[in-house]
Amino acid sequence: MRAHALWFLSVSAILGQIGCDPQVSGGSCPDPRDPEVRYVSHDPEECAVMDFDCSPPETLFSNECGCGCVGPEAPACPDASDPEVHYVSRDPRECELLDFACSPPETLFSNECGCGCIGPEAPACPDPSDPEVHYVSRDLRECELLDFACSPPETQFVNECGCGCIGPEAPACPDPGDPDVRYVSRDIEECHLIDFICTESQTLFYNECGCGCLDPDLPLGHARQGS
C-alpha cells in the first residue's frame, strides 16, 4: 500500500511538470524568463479562484501553466538620480489618484515606474548672499499668488528657486591705487553731502564705490614721472 502511494505521488509530480510543457493542450506556456511575461501564479487551481487584472496594453492569460499577464516590455524608468527627473510618486496606483501638473518646459510622465515630471535641469538659484539679490519668497506656490514689482534697474525673477528682484551687477570701482584716480570719499552717503568739483581735464565719478575725480589718460608713449 505504501509503495502504491509513493508511485501515485511520483506520477502526480511528473504530470504536474508536464502540465507546463510548451505543448500542453496544443498551447504554449508563456516563458517566465521573458520580460514581457508576468506570472501571478503557476498553480491553475489557485488561478481559478484568484481575481486580478492586467494593465493595458498587457493581456491576461490563464491556462494549465498558471496565470498572469503578457504585454510589452516595461519601459526603462526615468532615472531618479537625474536632476531633470522629479518623481511625485513611485506607486502607479497612487499616481492614478494624484492630480498634479508640471511647469513648462517640463513634461509629465505616468507609467509602471510611477509618475512625475521631466524637464531641463533647474537653473542655479540666485545667490541670496549677493547684495544685488532680494528674495520676496522662496516658495514657488506662494510666488504664483504674489503681486510684486521691482524698482528699475532691477529685474524680476520667478523660478523653481522662488521669486524676487535682481539688481544690475555692481560696476568696477575705480582703482584707488591708480595715480589717475582721486577719491574724495568712499562713503556714498557722505558723497551726497559733499560739494566738490574736478578740474577741467578731470572727469567726476559718483557711484556705489564713492565719489571723486579721474585724470585723463596719459598720451601714448608719455612716461609718467617716477616710473
Image (tube, rainbow, N blue to C red):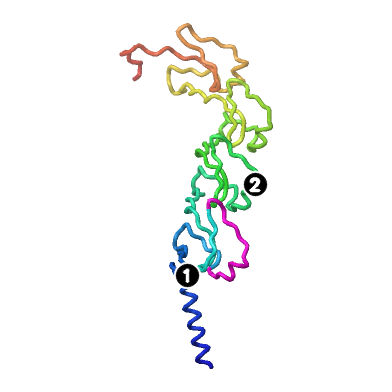
Q: Amino acid at mark 1?
A: Cys
Q: Please say whether residue 73 is one of the residues in the magenta stretch.
A: no
On the rendered image, what quadrant is the C terminus found in? top left
Name the residue that disc number 2 marks. 98
Q: Nearer the viewer, residue 189 or 30?
A: 30
Q: Residue furthest left?
A: 221
Q: Position of residue 39 (x, y in %)?
A: 52, 63
Identify the secondary structure beneath mark 2. Answer: loop
Span shown in magenta: 42-57
Q: Residue at x 49, y 49 (%)?
A: 79
Give the secondary structure at mark 1: loop
Between the residue at mark 1 and the residue at mark 2, the CA separation in whole angstroms equals 41 Å
Q: Position of residue 49 (x, y in %)?
A: 63, 67
Main secondary structure type of the part rendered in magenta: loop
- For marks 1 and 2, the one nearer the N-term is 1
Q: Where 25 sits versus 105, above or below?
A: below
Instruction: From the viewer's perspective, tell me whether residue 70 is left or right of residue 88.
Output: left
Residue beneath the point at 44% across and 70% down: 21
Look at 60% across and 28% down and name the residue there: 165
Residue most extreme to the top: 200
According to the picture, the residue beneath numbered tag 1 turns out to be 20
Asked if labels 2 and 1 touch by Cβ distance under 8 angstroms, the answer is no
